[in-house]
Amino acid sequence: MQEQHIASAFDRDLEAIQARIMKMGGMVETAILDAAQSLEERDEELAEKVRAGDKAIDALEEMINEECARLIALRSPTAIDLRVVLSVMKIAGNLERIGDYAKNMAKRTGVLIQMSPIEGSHAALRRMAREVQLMLKDALDAYIKRDAALARDVINRDRDVDQMYNALFREFLTFMLEDPRNITACMHLHFIAKNNERMGDHVTSIAEQVVYLVSGEKPDDNRPKGDKTSTDPSVAPDSAKVVADRNT
């Protein structure tokens, strides 16, 4: 009877923590979309909302970690229960980092508003952010439903985000080569694209946690990456050096 009571208390505590995870996930999804919208519409007020909202995301992560630590100390979970609690903490950490990247995107909006827009870039970045947000939504759904197949689908979709990043990298490089006056704006836009790509990586980590939670096995660490900018000589630092050389 006592063991049943302890199990029921653990389930209630865990359910409350998972509710906070979903709330945090919703806040992060909103931050991603708002950051991209603020850039496309050159909306400094919306960008400031994203920057200010990051504090609430950070506070929620801290609360989740404290509640998980308390749950471990009081309930001493084992086996699958412990795996769930540890997964929650890792997912919260990934969400917090995604929120940071959304904030970083919003920070650059104020700078880019003062510059001439680069044709087509803002809409492309918003599409990329939208794909990351949809991946995050599915990753969180996979967590709630314990759906390993959906989680693996999210992992595979990260390659699409990487390919979007590669295309934008080349596009920004072309704009810089054609007109050195575009260099500053394109560098800011490149950092935003890279933030999106990194958000996709953290979403993938969430999906990998789901697979581990369901199967007890971690996905293959050697999953293919679509970001080739650091290894492909056609888009790597040598190309960026050309821009610098032409501007000296």
Image (spheres, grey):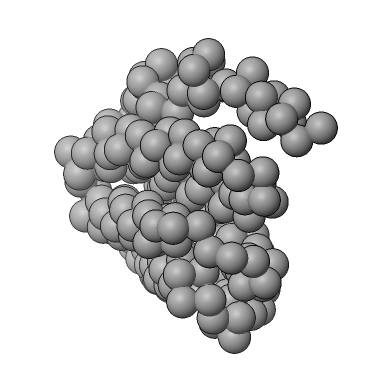
Give how far across and how far down residue 135 sits, in percent: 31, 51
Picture residue at 47% right of the left edge, 34% below the top: 170
Instruction: From this view, report whether residue 210 is shown above or below residue 113.
Output: above
Give how far across and how far down residue 120 sits, in percent: 39, 57
Give how far across and how far down residue 92 sits, in percent: 53, 56
Instruction: From this view, report whether residue 103 is shown above or below residue 34.
Output: above
Figure quadrant of the N terminus: bottom left
> From the viewer's perspective, is 236 left or right of 204?
right
Figure quadrant of the C terminus: top right
- Image quarter for residue 230? top right
> From the viewer's perspective, is 50 left or right of 139?
right
Picture residue at 49% right of the left edge, 17% below the top: 234
* Residue 186 vs residue 79, the one in the foreground: 186
Q: Residue furthest bottom?
A: 45
Instruction: From this view, report whether residue 211 is shown above or below residue 137.
Output: above
* Residue 99 vs residue 215, the one in the foreground: 99
Q: How many marks?
A: 0
Give how far across and how far down residue 47 sits, in percent: 58, 76
* Residue 164 vs residue 208, the one in the foreground: 164
Viewer can see residue 158: no
Viewer can see residue 106: yes
* Residue 245 vs residue 103, the one in the foreground: 245
Picture residue at 38% right of the left edge, 61% below the top: 123
- Image quarter for residue 11? bottom left
